[in-house]
Image (spheres, grey):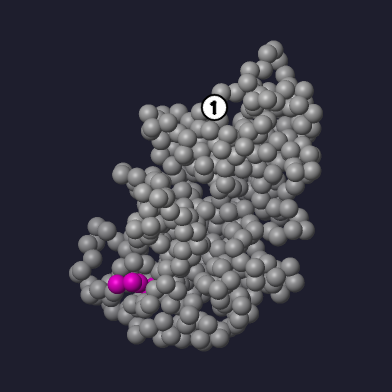
Amino acid sequence: MLDKIGIAKRIAREVRDGMYINLGIGIPTLVANYIPSSINVVLQSENGLLGIGPFPTEAEVDPDLINAGKQTITMMPGSALFSSAESFAMIRSGKVDLTILGAMEVSEQGDIANWKVPGKMVKGMGGAMDLVASAKHIIVAMQHCSKEGASKLLPSCTLPITGLRCVKRIVSDMAVVDILPGGGFKLLERAPGVTVDDIKKATAGKLIVEGEIPEMTL
Amino acid sequence: MINKVVADADEAVRDIPDQAVLMLGGFGLCGIPENAIAALLRKGVKGLTCISNNAGVDDFGIGLMLKTRQVKKMISSYVGENAEFERQLLSGELEVELIPQGTLAERVRAGGAGIPAFFTPAGVGTEVAAGKETRDFDGKIYLMERWLRADFSLVKAWKGDTAGNLIYRGTARNFNPMMAAAGKVTIAEVEELVPVGQLDPNHIHTPGIYVHRIFQGRGYEKRIEQRTTRKS
Protein backbone atom coordinates (compact mmCIF):
# COMPACT_ATOMS: atom_id res chain seq x y z
CA MET A 1 0.00 0.00 0.00
CA LEU A 2 1.13 3.53 -0.71
CA ASP A 3 0.90 6.39 1.72
CA LYS A 4 0.08 9.92 0.52
CA ILE A 5 3.71 10.59 -0.33
CA GLY A 6 3.87 7.35 -2.29
CA ILE A 7 0.81 8.31 -4.34
CA ALA A 8 2.36 11.73 -5.01
CA LYS A 9 5.68 10.12 -6.07
CA ARG A 10 3.93 7.73 -8.46
CA ILE A 11 1.89 10.55 -10.03
CA ALA A 12 5.05 12.63 -10.44
CA ARG A 13 6.23 9.92 -12.87
CA GLU A 14 3.30 10.83 -15.18
CA VAL A 15 4.64 14.35 -15.63
CA ARG A 16 6.34 15.14 -18.94
CA ASP A 17 8.69 17.92 -19.92
CA GLY A 18 6.93 21.07 -21.15
CA MET A 19 3.57 20.43 -19.48
CA TYR A 20 1.31 23.08 -17.99
CA ILE A 21 -0.24 21.46 -14.92
CA ASN A 22 -2.99 22.30 -12.44
CA LEU A 23 -2.62 20.62 -9.06
CA GLY A 24 -5.60 20.28 -6.76
CA ILE A 25 -5.54 20.64 -2.98
CA GLY A 26 -4.13 17.82 -0.81
CA ILE A 27 -2.09 14.95 -2.30
CA PRO A 28 -1.95 16.63 -5.75
CA THR A 29 -0.11 19.61 -4.22
CA LEU A 30 2.55 17.20 -2.92
CA VAL A 31 3.26 15.98 -6.46
CA ALA A 32 5.25 19.15 -7.14
CA ASN A 33 7.87 18.01 -4.60
CA TYR A 34 8.70 14.86 -6.59
CA ILE A 35 8.96 16.14 -10.17
CA PRO A 36 12.60 15.57 -11.22
CA SER A 37 14.61 18.75 -11.73
CA SER A 38 15.47 17.59 -15.27
CA ILE A 39 11.80 18.09 -16.21
CA ASN A 40 10.54 21.61 -16.85
CA VAL A 41 6.88 22.19 -16.14
CA VAL A 42 4.74 25.21 -15.30
CA LEU A 43 2.25 24.91 -12.46
CA GLN A 44 -1.01 26.80 -12.85
CA SER A 45 -2.89 28.19 -9.87
CA GLU A 46 -6.52 28.90 -10.75
CA ASN A 47 -6.56 32.07 -8.66
CA GLY A 48 -4.38 33.68 -11.30
CA LEU A 49 -0.79 32.49 -11.63
CA LEU A 50 1.31 30.45 -14.04
CA GLY A 51 4.59 29.51 -12.41
CA ILE A 52 4.01 28.48 -8.79
CA GLY A 53 7.33 28.30 -6.95
CA PRO A 54 8.25 26.76 -3.59
CA PHE A 55 6.71 27.89 -0.33
CA PRO A 56 8.36 31.14 0.83
CA THR A 57 10.86 31.49 3.62
CA GLU A 58 9.51 33.45 6.58
CA ALA A 59 11.17 36.58 5.15
CA GLU A 60 9.64 36.07 1.69
CA VAL A 61 6.01 35.67 2.85
CA ASP A 62 3.74 37.93 0.77
CA PRO A 63 -0.01 38.09 1.54
CA ASP A 64 -0.65 39.03 -2.11
CA LEU A 65 0.77 35.69 -3.32
CA ILE A 66 -1.24 32.57 -2.54
CA ASN A 67 -2.21 29.34 -4.26
CA ALA A 68 -5.72 27.95 -4.70
CA GLY A 69 -5.43 26.32 -1.26
CA LYS A 70 -4.81 29.82 0.18
CA GLN A 71 -1.23 28.87 1.12
CA THR A 72 1.52 31.44 0.77
CA ILE A 73 3.76 30.72 -2.25
CA THR A 74 6.52 32.20 -4.36
CA MET A 75 6.75 32.69 -8.12
CA MET A 76 9.20 31.02 -10.47
CA PRO A 77 11.23 33.21 -12.84
CA GLY A 78 9.09 33.72 -15.95
CA SER A 79 5.77 33.64 -14.09
CA ALA A 80 2.64 35.40 -15.27
CA LEU A 81 -0.24 36.82 -13.24
CA PHE A 82 -3.82 37.24 -14.47
CA SER A 83 -7.46 37.43 -13.43
CA SER A 84 -9.72 34.53 -12.46
CA ALA A 85 -11.62 34.95 -15.76
CA GLU A 86 -8.42 34.57 -17.78
CA SER A 87 -7.34 31.67 -15.57
CA PHE A 88 -10.46 29.69 -16.38
CA ALA A 89 -10.34 30.78 -20.02
CA MET A 90 -7.02 28.94 -20.37
CA ILE A 91 -8.44 25.96 -18.47
CA ARG A 92 -11.66 25.84 -20.51
CA SER A 93 -9.88 26.17 -23.84
CA GLY A 94 -7.68 23.16 -23.09
CA LYS A 95 -4.36 24.96 -22.69
CA VAL A 96 -3.64 23.19 -19.41
CA ASP A 97 -2.15 19.80 -20.29
CA LEU A 98 -2.71 17.91 -17.08
CA THR A 99 -5.06 18.22 -14.12
CA ILE A 100 -4.34 16.23 -10.96
CA LEU A 101 -7.06 16.21 -8.33
CA GLY A 102 -8.53 14.19 -5.50
CA ALA A 103 -11.81 12.28 -5.53
CA MET A 104 -14.28 10.71 -3.14
CA GLU A 105 -15.62 8.37 -5.84
CA VAL A 106 -14.85 7.52 -9.48
CA SER A 107 -17.12 5.41 -11.68
CA GLU A 108 -16.03 2.86 -14.28
CA GLN A 109 -17.25 5.37 -16.91
CA GLY A 110 -14.82 8.00 -15.61
CA ASP A 111 -17.40 10.07 -13.74
CA ILE A 112 -15.96 11.81 -10.69
CA ALA A 113 -17.57 12.90 -7.41
CA ASN A 114 -15.46 15.09 -5.15
CA TRP A 115 -17.36 18.17 -4.02
CA LYS A 116 -20.34 17.37 -1.85
CA VAL A 117 -21.57 14.90 0.74
CA PRO A 118 -25.32 15.45 1.14
CA GLY A 119 -26.40 16.03 4.73
CA LYS A 120 -22.92 17.10 5.77
CA MET A 121 -21.27 20.48 5.30
CA VAL A 122 -21.38 21.69 1.71
CA LYS A 123 -18.24 23.68 1.03
CA GLY A 124 -18.72 24.23 -2.68
CA MET A 125 -17.07 22.95 -5.83
CA GLY A 126 -14.51 25.72 -6.26
CA GLY A 127 -12.84 25.22 -9.63
CA ALA A 128 -13.23 21.44 -9.77
CA MET A 129 -16.21 21.35 -12.15
CA ASP A 130 -14.52 23.70 -14.61
CA LEU A 131 -11.27 21.72 -14.48
CA VAL A 132 -12.80 18.28 -15.02
CA ALA A 133 -15.08 19.52 -17.80
CA SER A 134 -12.20 20.84 -19.88
CA ALA A 135 -8.84 19.26 -18.99
CA LYS A 136 -7.14 17.26 -21.73
CA HIS A 137 -5.82 14.72 -19.23
CA ILE A 138 -7.08 14.10 -15.71
CA ILE A 139 -5.30 11.95 -13.14
CA VAL A 140 -7.07 11.29 -9.88
CA ALA A 141 -5.18 10.77 -6.62
CA MET A 142 -7.34 8.87 -4.14
CA GLN A 143 -7.70 6.12 -1.58
CA HIS A 144 -9.00 2.93 -3.14
CA CYS A 145 -11.41 2.31 -0.23
CA SER A 146 -13.03 4.32 2.53
CA LYS A 147 -11.89 3.97 6.13
CA GLU A 148 -14.77 1.50 6.55
CA GLY A 149 -13.37 -0.57 3.66
CA ALA A 150 -16.00 0.36 1.05
CA SER A 151 -14.69 0.65 -2.50
CA LYS A 152 -14.50 4.13 -4.03
CA LEU A 153 -14.03 2.74 -7.56
CA LEU A 154 -17.66 2.05 -8.40
CA PRO A 155 -19.97 0.97 -11.22
CA SER A 156 -21.55 4.42 -10.84
CA CYS A 157 -21.04 7.27 -8.38
CA THR A 158 -23.40 7.50 -5.40
CA LEU A 159 -22.35 11.04 -4.39
CA PRO A 160 -23.25 14.19 -6.38
CA ILE A 161 -21.26 14.25 -9.61
CA THR A 162 -18.51 16.81 -10.32
CA GLY A 163 -18.11 15.82 -13.97
CA LEU A 164 -19.08 13.05 -16.39
CA ARG A 165 -16.73 10.70 -18.29
CA CYS A 166 -13.63 12.78 -17.65
CA VAL A 167 -11.16 10.76 -15.54
CA LYS A 168 -8.49 9.00 -17.59
CA ARG A 169 -6.24 7.53 -14.91
CA ILE A 170 -6.35 6.82 -11.18
CA VAL A 171 -3.38 6.44 -8.85
CA SER A 172 -4.67 5.01 -5.58
CA ASP A 173 -2.91 3.63 -2.52
CA MET A 174 -3.32 0.16 -4.11
CA ALA A 175 -3.03 0.50 -7.87
CA VAL A 176 -2.71 2.45 -11.08
CA VAL A 177 -5.75 1.98 -13.31
CA ASP A 178 -6.90 3.54 -16.57
CA ILE A 179 -10.53 4.13 -17.40
CA LEU A 180 -11.16 2.63 -20.83
CA PRO A 181 -13.08 4.70 -23.39
CA GLY A 182 -15.86 2.09 -23.36
CA GLY A 183 -15.90 1.91 -19.56
CA GLY A 184 -14.11 -0.25 -17.00
CA PHE A 185 -11.03 0.05 -14.80
CA LYS A 186 -8.00 -1.46 -16.55
CA LEU A 187 -5.41 -2.52 -14.01
CA LEU A 188 -1.92 -1.32 -14.96
CA GLU A 189 0.20 -1.57 -11.82
CA ARG A 190 0.04 -2.86 -8.26
CA ALA A 191 1.33 -0.94 -5.25
CA PRO A 192 4.21 -2.64 -3.39
CA GLY A 193 2.88 -5.55 -1.31
CA VAL A 194 -0.58 -5.50 -2.93
CA THR A 195 -1.84 -8.51 -4.93
CA VAL A 196 -4.18 -8.53 -7.91
CA ASP A 197 -6.70 -10.34 -5.68
CA ASP A 198 -6.50 -7.53 -3.10
CA ILE A 199 -7.28 -5.02 -5.85
CA LYS A 200 -10.15 -7.15 -7.20
CA LYS A 201 -11.70 -7.26 -3.73
CA ALA A 202 -11.28 -3.49 -3.29
CA THR A 203 -12.79 -2.53 -6.66
CA ALA A 204 -16.59 -2.56 -6.85
CA GLY A 205 -16.67 -1.40 -10.49
CA LYS A 206 -15.65 -3.56 -13.44
CA LEU A 207 -11.92 -4.36 -13.16
CA ILE A 208 -10.11 -5.54 -16.26
CA VAL A 209 -6.97 -7.59 -15.64
CA GLU A 210 -4.93 -8.73 -18.62
CA GLY A 211 -1.63 -10.60 -18.31
CA GLU A 212 0.97 -10.04 -15.62
CA ILE A 213 0.41 -6.87 -13.58
CA PRO A 214 3.76 -5.34 -12.59
CA GLU A 215 4.49 -3.78 -9.22
CA MET A 216 4.87 -0.04 -9.57
CA THR A 217 8.24 1.67 -9.22
CA LEU A 218 8.46 5.03 -7.49
CA MET B 1 -9.45 64.08 -16.13
CA ILE B 2 -12.56 63.28 -14.13
CA ASN B 3 -11.83 63.19 -10.42
CA LYS B 4 -13.41 60.17 -8.70
CA VAL B 5 -11.80 60.50 -5.30
CA VAL B 6 -13.94 60.25 -2.17
CA ALA B 7 -12.62 60.91 1.32
CA ASP B 8 -12.89 57.45 2.78
CA ALA B 9 -14.75 54.15 2.89
CA ASP B 10 -17.72 55.59 4.78
CA GLU B 11 -18.31 58.20 2.11
CA ALA B 12 -17.82 55.63 -0.63
CA VAL B 13 -20.55 53.29 0.68
CA ARG B 14 -22.88 56.06 1.92
CA ASP B 15 -25.78 55.26 -0.45
CA ILE B 16 -25.65 51.45 -0.43
CA PRO B 17 -29.21 50.55 0.64
CA ASP B 18 -30.67 47.53 2.40
CA GLN B 19 -31.31 44.63 -0.04
CA ALA B 20 -28.52 45.76 -2.38
CA VAL B 21 -26.74 43.26 -4.63
CA LEU B 22 -22.99 43.58 -4.09
CA MET B 23 -19.91 42.11 -5.72
CA LEU B 24 -16.83 41.86 -3.52
CA GLY B 25 -13.42 41.09 -5.03
CA GLY B 26 -10.93 38.66 -3.54
CA PHE B 27 -9.92 35.02 -3.41
CA GLY B 28 -9.98 33.76 0.14
CA LEU B 29 -8.74 36.81 2.06
CA CYS B 30 -6.36 37.84 -0.74
CA GLY B 31 -7.38 41.07 -2.48
CA ILE B 32 -10.56 41.71 -0.50
CA PRO B 33 -11.92 45.25 0.02
CA GLU B 34 -11.12 45.39 3.74
CA ASN B 35 -11.99 49.06 4.21
CA ALA B 36 -15.34 48.90 2.40
CA ILE B 37 -16.37 45.83 4.43
CA ALA B 38 -15.52 47.68 7.65
CA ALA B 39 -17.63 50.64 6.47
CA LEU B 40 -20.59 48.36 5.69
CA LEU B 41 -20.31 46.96 9.21
CA ARG B 42 -20.42 50.50 10.65
CA LYS B 43 -23.32 51.45 8.39
CA GLY B 44 -25.30 48.37 9.43
CA VAL B 45 -26.92 47.93 6.02
CA LYS B 46 -28.94 44.68 5.89
CA GLY B 47 -30.46 42.08 3.55
CA LEU B 48 -27.42 42.10 1.27
CA THR B 49 -26.80 39.69 -1.57
CA CYS B 50 -23.03 39.20 -1.80
CA ILE B 51 -21.41 37.83 -4.93
CA SER B 52 -17.90 36.79 -3.93
CA ASN B 53 -15.78 33.73 -4.64
CA ASN B 54 -15.53 32.99 -0.91
CA ALA B 55 -17.28 34.13 2.26
CA GLY B 56 -14.29 35.13 4.36
CA VAL B 57 -13.44 33.45 7.67
CA ASP B 58 -15.30 33.72 10.98
CA ASP B 59 -13.60 36.91 12.09
CA PHE B 60 -12.42 38.55 8.86
CA GLY B 61 -13.69 39.54 5.45
CA ILE B 62 -17.33 38.84 4.59
CA GLY B 63 -17.43 36.58 7.66
CA LEU B 64 -17.71 39.75 9.75
CA MET B 65 -20.93 40.71 7.91
CA LEU B 66 -22.31 37.20 8.35
CA LYS B 67 -21.79 37.48 12.09
CA THR B 68 -23.82 40.71 12.20
CA ARG B 69 -26.51 39.04 10.02
CA GLN B 70 -26.24 41.66 7.29
CA VAL B 71 -26.10 39.10 4.49
CA LYS B 72 -29.27 37.50 3.11
CA LYS B 73 -27.70 35.55 0.29
CA MET B 74 -24.20 34.46 -0.79
CA ILE B 75 -23.30 33.62 -4.37
CA SER B 76 -19.90 31.88 -4.24
CA SER B 77 -17.85 28.94 -5.48
CA TYR B 78 -16.29 27.80 -2.19
CA VAL B 79 -17.30 28.65 1.34
CA GLY B 80 -15.45 26.05 3.38
CA GLU B 81 -13.54 28.17 5.89
CA ASN B 82 -16.34 29.62 7.94
CA ALA B 83 -18.16 27.99 10.89
CA GLU B 84 -20.70 30.81 11.28
CA PHE B 85 -21.52 30.45 7.60
CA GLU B 86 -22.13 26.73 8.11
CA ARG B 87 -24.41 27.38 11.07
CA GLN B 88 -26.53 29.94 9.18
CA LEU B 89 -26.70 27.74 6.10
CA LEU B 90 -27.85 24.65 8.00
CA SER B 91 -30.40 26.66 10.01
CA GLY B 92 -31.81 28.20 6.82
CA GLU B 93 -31.03 31.78 7.87
CA LEU B 94 -28.71 32.25 4.91
CA GLU B 95 -29.47 31.52 1.28
CA VAL B 96 -26.52 30.19 -0.72
CA GLU B 97 -25.97 29.66 -4.41
CA LEU B 98 -22.84 27.68 -5.24
CA ILE B 99 -21.38 28.18 -8.71
CA PRO B 100 -18.33 26.57 -10.35
CA GLN B 101 -15.47 29.03 -9.98
CA GLY B 102 -14.78 29.46 -13.68
CA THR B 103 -18.47 29.90 -14.36
CA LEU B 104 -18.66 32.51 -11.60
CA ALA B 105 -15.68 34.39 -13.06
CA GLU B 106 -17.15 34.27 -16.56
CA ARG B 107 -20.68 35.24 -15.44
CA VAL B 108 -19.20 38.33 -13.80
CA ARG B 109 -17.02 38.99 -16.84
CA ALA B 110 -20.10 38.66 -19.09
CA GLY B 111 -21.96 41.13 -16.87
CA GLY B 112 -19.20 43.67 -17.36
CA ALA B 113 -18.90 42.94 -21.08
CA GLY B 114 -22.56 43.29 -22.05
CA ILE B 115 -23.03 39.59 -22.83
CA PRO B 116 -26.29 38.27 -21.30
CA ALA B 117 -25.47 34.57 -21.58
CA PHE B 118 -22.82 32.10 -22.75
CA PHE B 119 -22.23 28.35 -22.94
CA THR B 120 -19.72 26.43 -20.81
CA PRO B 121 -19.02 22.72 -20.31
CA ALA B 122 -18.58 23.11 -16.53
CA GLY B 123 -21.39 21.49 -14.58
CA VAL B 124 -22.92 19.44 -17.41
CA GLY B 125 -24.50 16.32 -15.89
CA THR B 126 -24.32 17.74 -12.35
CA GLU B 127 -26.88 19.41 -10.10
CA VAL B 128 -25.53 22.76 -11.32
CA ALA B 129 -27.23 22.02 -14.65
CA ALA B 130 -30.72 21.72 -13.13
CA GLY B 131 -33.21 23.88 -15.02
CA LYS B 132 -30.60 25.25 -17.43
CA GLU B 133 -30.60 25.04 -21.20
CA THR B 134 -28.00 22.71 -22.71
CA ARG B 135 -26.83 22.66 -26.29
CA ASP B 136 -24.56 20.51 -28.46
CA PHE B 137 -21.75 22.40 -30.17
CA ASP B 138 -19.52 20.28 -32.43
CA GLY B 139 -20.36 17.11 -30.53
CA LYS B 140 -19.90 18.34 -26.96
CA ILE B 141 -22.66 19.37 -24.55
CA TYR B 142 -22.57 22.83 -22.99
CA LEU B 143 -24.64 24.61 -20.38
CA MET B 144 -26.11 28.07 -20.81
CA GLU B 145 -25.16 30.46 -18.01
CA ARG B 146 -26.42 34.03 -17.49
CA TRP B 147 -24.45 37.13 -16.74
CA LEU B 148 -24.13 38.55 -13.23
CA ARG B 149 -24.29 42.26 -12.47
CA ALA B 150 -24.32 44.19 -9.22
CA ASP B 151 -25.78 47.38 -7.80
CA PHE B 152 -22.39 48.07 -6.23
CA SER B 153 -19.02 46.44 -6.83
CA LEU B 154 -16.42 46.72 -4.08
CA VAL B 155 -12.93 46.09 -5.36
CA LYS B 156 -9.42 46.36 -3.99
CA ALA B 157 -6.34 47.29 -5.98
CA TRP B 158 -2.71 47.94 -5.18
CA LYS B 159 -2.38 51.32 -6.86
CA GLY B 160 -4.90 53.64 -8.36
CA ASP B 161 -5.07 57.20 -9.64
CA THR B 162 -7.63 59.94 -9.15
CA ALA B 163 -9.24 59.05 -12.51
CA GLY B 164 -9.98 55.52 -11.24
CA ASN B 165 -7.33 53.60 -13.19
CA LEU B 166 -6.25 50.53 -11.22
CA ILE B 167 -3.23 48.23 -10.95
CA TYR B 168 -3.43 45.00 -8.96
CA ARG B 169 -0.58 43.08 -7.37
CA GLY B 170 0.18 39.35 -7.34
CA THR B 171 -2.74 36.97 -6.99
CA ALA B 172 -4.74 39.74 -5.29
CA ARG B 173 -6.09 40.54 -8.77
CA ASN B 174 -8.37 37.44 -9.02
CA PHE B 175 -12.04 38.55 -9.35
CA ASN B 176 -11.42 42.28 -8.92
CA PRO B 177 -11.09 43.35 -12.58
CA MET B 178 -14.30 41.60 -13.74
CA MET B 179 -16.24 42.83 -10.74
CA ALA B 180 -15.04 46.39 -11.33
CA ALA B 181 -16.61 46.18 -14.79
CA ALA B 182 -19.85 44.52 -13.67
CA GLY B 183 -20.99 47.06 -11.06
CA LYS B 184 -23.57 49.77 -11.74
CA VAL B 185 -21.53 51.70 -9.19
CA THR B 186 -17.96 50.52 -8.65
CA ILE B 187 -16.07 51.51 -5.54
CA ALA B 188 -12.32 50.92 -5.60
CA GLU B 189 -10.07 51.05 -2.59
CA VAL B 190 -6.32 51.17 -3.11
CA GLU B 191 -3.20 50.90 -1.01
CA GLU B 192 -1.68 53.86 -2.82
CA LEU B 193 -3.69 56.62 -4.47
CA VAL B 194 -1.70 58.83 -6.85
CA PRO B 195 -2.47 61.85 -9.05
CA VAL B 196 -3.24 61.26 -12.74
CA GLY B 197 -0.12 60.89 -14.83
CA GLN B 198 1.76 58.90 -12.19
CA LEU B 199 0.71 55.46 -13.43
CA ASP B 200 2.10 54.17 -16.71
CA PRO B 201 -0.91 53.66 -19.04
CA ASN B 202 0.81 50.49 -20.31
CA HIS B 203 0.42 48.95 -16.88
CA ILE B 204 -3.24 49.71 -16.13
CA HIS B 205 -5.31 46.57 -15.46
CA THR B 206 -8.70 48.23 -14.91
CA PRO B 207 -9.33 51.40 -16.95
CA GLY B 208 -10.94 54.22 -14.96
CA ILE B 209 -14.16 54.12 -17.00
CA TYR B 210 -15.31 51.21 -14.81
CA VAL B 211 -14.60 52.94 -11.51
CA HIS B 212 -16.99 55.53 -10.05
CA ARG B 213 -15.44 56.15 -6.65
CA ILE B 214 -11.90 55.63 -5.43
CA PHE B 215 -10.27 56.14 -2.06
CA GLN B 216 -7.01 55.41 -0.33
CA GLY B 217 -7.57 52.58 2.15
CA ARG B 218 -6.09 52.58 5.63
CA GLY B 219 -4.57 50.04 7.98
CA TYR B 220 -4.58 47.03 5.70
CA GLU B 221 -4.31 43.83 7.68
CA LYS B 222 -3.99 41.53 4.62
CA ARG B 223 -4.58 38.51 6.78
CA ILE B 224 -3.06 35.22 5.58
CA GLU B 225 -5.28 32.13 5.79
CA GLN B 226 -2.62 29.44 5.38
CA ARG B 227 0.80 30.79 6.25
CA THR B 228 3.02 28.09 4.74
CA THR B 229 6.79 28.48 4.74
CA ARG B 230 9.96 26.52 4.08
CA LYS B 231 13.03 26.50 6.31
CA SER B 232 15.54 28.05 3.91
Mark 1 surroundings: few (<14), some (14-19) or many (≥20) residues within 10 A: some
Can you identify the residue that label 1 sits on? A218
First to last magenta residue range: B188-192
Report whether residue A95 is seen. Answer: no
Write the residue at 33% across / 72% down.
B191
Q: Provide residue B173's location: percent of width, then percent of height.
A: 40, 60
A1 sits to left or right of B9: right
The count of marks equals: 1
Query: For residue A151, which quarter of the picture?
Result: top right
Q: Chain of mark 1?
A: A
B168 sits to left or right of B195: right
Write the residue at 59% across / 63% down.
B81
Q: Amino acid at mark 1?
A: Leu
Q: Provide residue B230's location: percent of width, then percent of height.
A: 42, 50
Find the residue positioned furthest to the left: B197
Is residue A81 magenta-colored? no
A85 sits to left or right of B100: left
Q: Is residue A192 above or below residue A103?
A: above
Q: Provide residue A163's location: percent of width, then percent of height.
A: 65, 43
Write the residue at 38% across / 32% down.
A37
Write the residue at 63% across / 79% down.
B69
A90 sits to left or right of A166: left
Is residue B189 magenta-colored? yes
Seen from the viewer's position, the closer of residues A151 and A58 is A58
Q: Provide residue B225's location: percent of width, then percent of height.
A: 50, 62
